[in-house]
Amino acid sequence: MSGAFRTAGQFVVILALFAGVAMLSSWPAYHQIPDNTGVMVLTFVHGADRKGECRRLTPEEIAKLPPNMRRVQDCPRVRRSLHVELDVDGRNVYRADLPPTGIAGDGPSKVYQRFVLPAGKYDVAVRMRDTARAEGFDHERRETVDFAPAQLLVIDYRPESGEFIFR
Amino acid sequence: MIGAIRSVLRAGFDAIERPFDRLFSPALNPLAQLGALGFFFFWIVAVSGIYLFIFFDTGIERAYQSVEYLTHDHWFHAGVMRSFHRYASDLMVVMVAVHLLREFAYDHYRGVRWYSWFTGLPIIWLLYASGITGYWLVWDKLAQYVALVSSELLDWLPVFGEPIARNFIATGTLTSRFFSLMVFMHVAVPLFLLFIMWVHILRISRPKVNPPRALALLSLVALLAVSIWNPALSQGHADLAKVPATVGLDWLYLPLYPLTTLWGNGAVWAFLGAFSLMIALMPWLPPLRRAKAVEVHLDHCNGCARCAEDCPYEAIRMVGRTDNLPFPTQAQVNPSLCVSCGICVGSCPSSTPFRRSEELRTGIDLPEYPLKELRERVLETARGLSGPGRLLVLACEHGAAAGRLEGTVVMPCVAMAPPSLIDYILSRDLADGVVIAGCAESACYNRLGVKWTEERFAAQRDPYLRARVPRERIAKIWASALQVRHAEAEIAAFGAKVAQLPPLKMRSPLPASAPSAQPKAREPAEARNEP
C-alpha cells in the first residue's frame, strides 16, 4: 500500500469514527414527554407546626440550668408531618405525609412531584394540613387550569401569605 | 465468568486491532494510543474552552446570546472552536470507555496495576461532571433539561434542604450568579480532572501522554472536517415556563438521563453506586497470582541503571551503594510494584549465558525463574532439535507461541532474554535459527517488552545484540495469543528459509553444555561477556 493511499485510509477511518461521535452528540432526539402532554409539578417547602406546645419553666427548673443557658420556656423542636393531597378532575393523584427534614426533625417538610398530563382543561385541587388538627385542611385551593402542550405548571405554596399559587 | 467476558472482549479487540496494525502500523494504531489520545483531547478541550471563554457572557439572558453570537457570527473561528470543544469532549469519553474495556480485556488491571485502574474511576466521574456542567452553560433547551434532571437527581440524595430543582421550574428564580458559579465549576472540575489524570499515570514508567505526531495531526484535521460538516449548535433558548419536551441528547455524556424517567432517580443512583463499586473492586475479583519479585544480587550489580531505565512499572530505582564495591549506586526493587516480567533481567549486563567459570548469576534475577534456569531450558530444548533448519523459539507467555510444545522456551516476556542469549544459541550451535515470538506489537502485555527487544536488536539500546550475530538467522514474530495460526505459518516459513542457509561459521570452540563451577571472585561485566 503506497504511503498516500495508506494515509488516506487512516484518515477515512478516523473521520468515520469522529463523524459517528459527532452524530451521537445530538442524535437521536430524546422525547422527554409524549406529544401533546405537559408537566404539572407540585413543589414547596414548608414547616408544619411543632409537635408539642411551649411550656413555661418553673423558677426551680430555670435555676437548675447553667447560667448561660437559662430560658423561660421549653419548646420542643420536632415538627409535625405535613399532610398534602392533590386532586385532578376529582381524582386523587397524590396524597402523602411529609416528614420534617433535619437530624432533629425540626426542618421544613418538602415536596417535589412531577405529573405528566395530556393537554386540556382540568379541575385541580390541592390541600394541606400543617397543624395538629386530625381532620380537615388548613390550606386549600381549587382552580380550573387550561393545560397547554409542553406547559410546565407549578403548584407552589407561599408560607408568607399562607396560600397556594398556580404558575 | 469474568474470565469468559475478558476472553470474548479480547477476541473482539484482537479482531479490530490487527487490521488496524496493518493500516496504521503498530506505532500509530489508535487502539494502542487510547490513553495518549485521551490526554490529547483533554488539551484540545482546554484550549478551545479558553478561547470560547473570551466570547462567553455569564449573564442570565446573555449566556445564550453570547453562545449564539460566537456560533453564528463568528462561526469560522469561535464556532469551529465550539465544535472542537464539544466533539473533543465526546471523543474523550469514547477514549476513556474503550481504554477501560481494553485494559480489562488484556487483564491489565490486576496485581500491581490496580493503582492505575482504581484511579481511573474518579476520572470517569470527573469527566462526566465536567461535561455536564458545560452543557448547563449554553442555557438552551438541552441545558434546561440537563439542569432539571441533574438537580432532581441531586435532590434525591438526603443532603440538600430545599429542592435544587425548584430553581429551574419557574422564571425569576435564577440569577446571573448561577452562571458565574457554573463557569467556576466548569473550570475547577476539569482542573481537578487533570490532577487525577496525573495521579493515574504516576506508577507507570514512560506513560504515553502524547500520541504520535502523525496520529495527532490526522485527528486534528478530522476534527476540523467534522466541525465544519456538523457544527455544534444550540437548541433554542431555555424557557422555564415550558418543558423541553424534545431535546437532541448527547448520548455519550447523558445516557443515564432518560433512565431517570424510566427507572427513577433512586435506581439510577443505585446503578452508579454498583458500577463504581464493581470497578473499584475488580482488581481483586479474583486477585492476580503474582510470582516473586525480582531480587538484586549486589555482587553482580555495577549500578549501571539499565534495569531501572527499562522497568515498565517504576519498580526499580537506583540508590546509594550499601556494599564496598567501587560503584556509586545499586538497584533497589520495590516488590509491591514488580510484576516479575523479567525485562530487567534481560537488560542487565551481567546477564550473559556464556559465563562458565562460576555458577550463572546475574545482577538482578527472578527467584522463581532465574537466568540459570532459562539457560538450562534453552539447552534442554535445543537437545530435542534435529534436521535442517533447527529453530529455537523464545516465546512470551502472553503471545501466540506460548502454547507451543516443540523447540520452544517460554518466559514472562521476550525482553527477559538478554541479547547475548541469541548469540549463545547460535554460536554454540544449539540451533540454526532463533525465533523471538512476543505479543502483538501494539499490545505488549508488559508495555515495553516488544519495544526494548527491537531496540536492543537494532543496537539502539543497551545491551546490544552483537554485530557478529547473523541477523538472517533471527526472526521476530509479534502476534497476539489469538494469532496462533499466523505465528505458526511464519515460524514454518522461517524454518524453511534457515534450512537453505549455508552452515553457520561462528561456532564457539567451547562445549555446548553449561558447566557449573564454584563461584569465583567477581569480574567486570564486560570481561565476562565472553567469548
Image: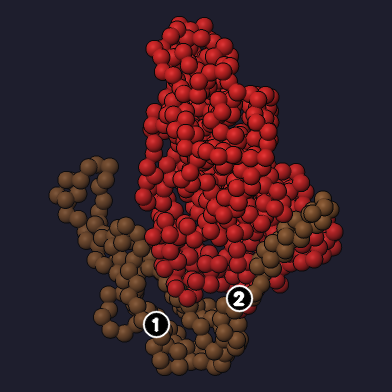
Chain colours: A brown, B red
Callout 1 amino acid = Tyr
User: Mark 2 highlights which residue?
Assistant: A30
Q: Residue at x 24, y 57 (%)?
A: A74
Mark 2 belongs to chain: A
Q: Nearer the viewer, mark 1 or mark 2?
A: 2
Residue situated in front as seen by the camera: B82 or B99: B99
Residue B436 location (% of width, % of height): 58, 38
Q: Quadrant of residue B69?
A: bottom right
Callout 2 amino acid = Tyr
Gap between marks 1 and 2 measured at Cα:
27 Å
| Quadrant that contains the N terminus of chain A | bottom right
Disc 1 crowd, CA 10 A, few/some/many (<14, 14-19, 20+): some
- Mark 1 touches mark 2? (CB < 8 Å): no
Circle 2 SS class: strand
Q: Is residue B68 left or right of residue B171?
A: right
Q: Is residue B351 left or right of residue B222?
A: left
User: Mark 1 highlights which residue?
Assistant: A94
Circle 1 SS class: strand
Disc 2 crowd, CA 10 A, few/some/many (<14, 14-19, 20+): some
